[in-house]
Image: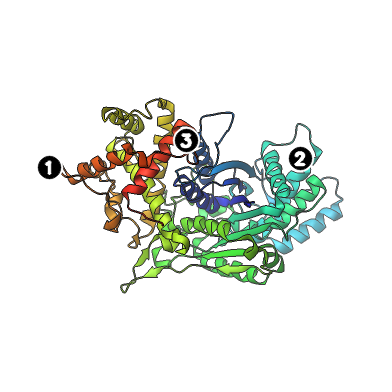
Amino acid sequence: MDDKLFLIAIGGTGMRCLESFVHLCAAGLFDNRTIDILTLDTDQNNGNKGRVEDLINLYNRVKTNDSATPGGQPRSNTFFSAKLNLYKFFTDYSDSKRRTLVTLAQTPNLTEEQRADNQDLSDLLFDRDTVQQFHLDHGYRAQTHLGSMLMYHGIIEAALSWKRGGKDVKPQEKELVEFLQLISKHQAQARVFVFGSVFGGTGASSIPVIPLAFSEALKVINGKELNLNQVLFGSTLLTDYFNFNAATSQQLQGDKVVAQSTNFAINSQAALSFYEKDQTVRSTYKRMYHIGFPSELKINYSEGQPASKVLTGGHEQKNPCHLAELMCAVAAYDFFEVPRPELAKVGVAEYVFRTVEVDDHGVMRLTGNSFVGDKNHAGEIFENKLGAFLSLAHMILSKFHGADETQCGMINLLNYFSEMKFEDYSNLSDEQCREIDEYFKEFAYKFVRNTVVFGWIYQIYKSVGNAQFIFAPEAFRSNPQELADIDPGTIFLDEYHHWDKDFGVSSASERRFSRFMKMVKSDSSNPTEQQAQTLKEAFLAHMYNALTQAQHFDFA
């Protein structure tokens, strides 16, 4: 029996790691798997949180429009092969009586002496004028000593609220309980992977307490703790990989506490030292993936933001995605692929990492093996799936104009198929076509008022700096004029994976696409029952098969 897979994304960085994970699922990396996902934050309005939750909902609409089976079914060797189930929980600090530590600590029915004792204890642990006063609804702002206590408390509080029942139970509390009950039901086969950073606030606060908090919450819910010897927990240990400008004294006066990126390196060191020594962390996690990034390649997220303001959270916090987050997503892939007996025998948390090849000039060379290793052709499979998805994105968005705000590339592509006497997918609805267009815009790019807005893979490419990244630089053209002429058949650095050309006098790009269309119309690219049951699934599987053939990947 396959293990039951669970994923938890915590804080803004965790949400962006999840974003990379979802795009890998769309490219087909998690074949035939159902993955239950929990987004966990203090900031219900965080822009990165909203963006990835919207992406998962879009993923599920692309996978199926059948309301009877939301999110569709797991498939193999196709795009959008994994089934994703989304659950959302946030610790609610929106009420003025819960917004700061001071107000949270004001338990009713205490004597004055008890209140004084509480304040003395708070003053011993937390600075009165700053840490006790800042608004908690934008996260824990690198105050991990406070955040761990409050996140643990928030999870237990949600379980108690659900247990009491009644109309006061909040939707996010119900979703958390449903997620926890699934883990409890499948604990003998459960793997739980946690996305979060160790240098910031919410993720760094939550990673150490998640297993025990879940266990204690289930004790409240079901009267029985989680068997932490059965459930396999893994996590990222993502150290600092970006920076931002320092907050002004005026902002500090208003916000009380604002994270400082100049402290991220020492925060990372302190967290890693803690995890290495803490017995609870060492005994409840099986694997912890230590992921870092060269300091000279760090991106400044303050670029494009008002110079006088550091974003602490909210709708505006929509930081671009980064290579380090993609590395976290493939860490989850590794954790989910390790044989259960190998993980089950781990007594004390293992720390693992993967090095990246560097050439004689100090330039990183990122291949499929850099991400997922070379066992059983894993690196080649990774390159094929991501490359096929990027090629299809360029076909729909550029060749058939889907990036344009006024057009639908999928409709244009199907019209072209009809002209070529290929009618297999003519009954796809306009709504289905637009959903596929919309997903590829999130994955790659779109045009807004004749300007290219970069999606996920373009943001990843920008973050690698001068490193080589599987694909040729020409695959990431960045203005509408250049994209109009892009050749989806030549995106790989390795020319062996370029599409073959027909003979003729037309351009090389047109001759490549002509050969590709012959593959599409060939019986050899027809989808199998394992790949597809619906017309939309059949289209996606058909494109996957034809593109894999065109790219010359042989995994035999």
Question: What's the residue at 70%, 47% (across, down)?
Answer: 180
Q: In this picture, is 16 found above or below 437?
A: below
Q: Taking 49 as reference, is 119 left or right?
A: right
Mark number, residue 272: none
Camera sees residue 346 = yes
Camera sees residue 459 = no
Q: Taking 199 as reference, is 92 left or right?
A: right
In front: 254, or 522?
Answer: 522
Identity of the residue furthest to the front in this view: 523
Question: Circle 1 is placed at which residue position?
Answer: 505
Question: What's the residue at 15%, 41% (across, down)?
Answer: 506
Q: Are marks 2 and 3 in contact (CB under 8 Å)?
A: no
| Residue 259 x %, y % | 54, 58
Q: Secondary structure at mark 3?
A: helix
Crowd around label 1: few <14 · some 14–19 · many ≥20 (10 Å): few
Q: Secondary structure at mark 1?
A: loop
Question: Circle 3 is placed at which residue position?
Answer: 62
Identity of the residue furthest to the left in this view: 505
Amino acid type at circle 3 is Val
Crowd around label 2: few <14 · some 14–19 · many ≥20 (10 Å): many
Q: Give the mark, 2 or 3, whose residue is nearer the N terminus.
A: 3
Rendered image quadrant of residue 449: top left
Q: Nearer the viewer, mark 2 or mark 3?
A: 3
Mark number, residue 162: 2
Q: Nearer the viewer, mark 1 or mark 2?
A: 1
Rendered image quadrant of residue 34: top right
| Residue 346 x %, y % | 66, 68
